[in-house]
Image (cartoon, rainbow, N blue to C red):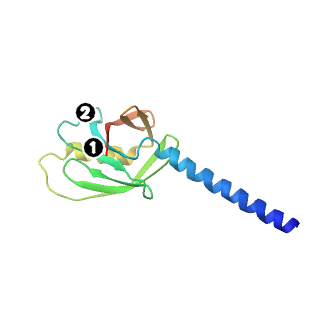
Amino acid sequence: MKVILRNLFGVILTTLILSSCASRKDQAAAGLEGRKWNLVSVGGKQAGAANAFIQFGKEAGKINGKGGCNGFGGTYSGDGSKIKIEGIISTRMACDDLDTENAFFRALRAADRYKVQQDTLYLYENDIQLAVLKGAPL
């Protein structure tokens, strides 16, 4: 009987731990998924007509988007307001103006924290604001 209770306790404890981890991942993605985040400014400069955006996928922390000229993809993870964007790969099309795109990719790689207020996403490195994006439903 003690063995059965101990095994049952182990199963319950494992289930609670795993569900706790899953809910933390969901909280990290809260407000990010299900929207197309259009770049408004990066590094304090307006994005203009760059048409850059990012989307946070529900599938295993995947991201995709457009830097302005080139499409890109990668992964993200987070905990609470912390975020880490990694493995960004992009196409390599030649464009007249790659300054905004390069700054956007640098900001994504450097971001360690984010904040969502209404329909606006702010990306930060420490206390320095890297980029501002406006959300639109998919």
Which label is found at residue 30? Answer: none
Mark 2: which secondary structure? strand
- Tell me the kind of residue under disc 2: Lys
Q: Is there any visible trace of residue 87 in the rendered image?
A: no
- For the residue pair 9 and 38, the one nearer the viewer reads as 9
- In the image, residue 32 lies at what x, y percent? 41, 43
- For the residue pair 16 and 115, the one nearer the viewer reads as 16
- In the image, residue 102 lies at what x, y percent? 25, 47
At horizontal 32% and vertical 56% (from top left) the residue drawn is 73
What residue is pinned by disc 2?
45
Q: Earlier in the sequence, mark 1 or mark 2?
A: 2
At horizontal 19% and vertical 42% (from top left) the residue drawn is 50
At horizontal 37% and vertical 48% (from top left) the residue drawn is 109
At horizontal 84% and vertical 68% (from top left) the residue drawn is 3
Vertical order, 66 against 135 (above or below):
below
How many neighbours does mark 1 have within 10 angstroms: few (below 14), some (14-19), or many (20 or more)?
Answer: some
- Tell me the kind of residue under disc 1: Ala
What residue is pinned by disc 1?
103
User: Cβ–Cβ below 8 Å for labels 1 and 2?
Assistant: yes
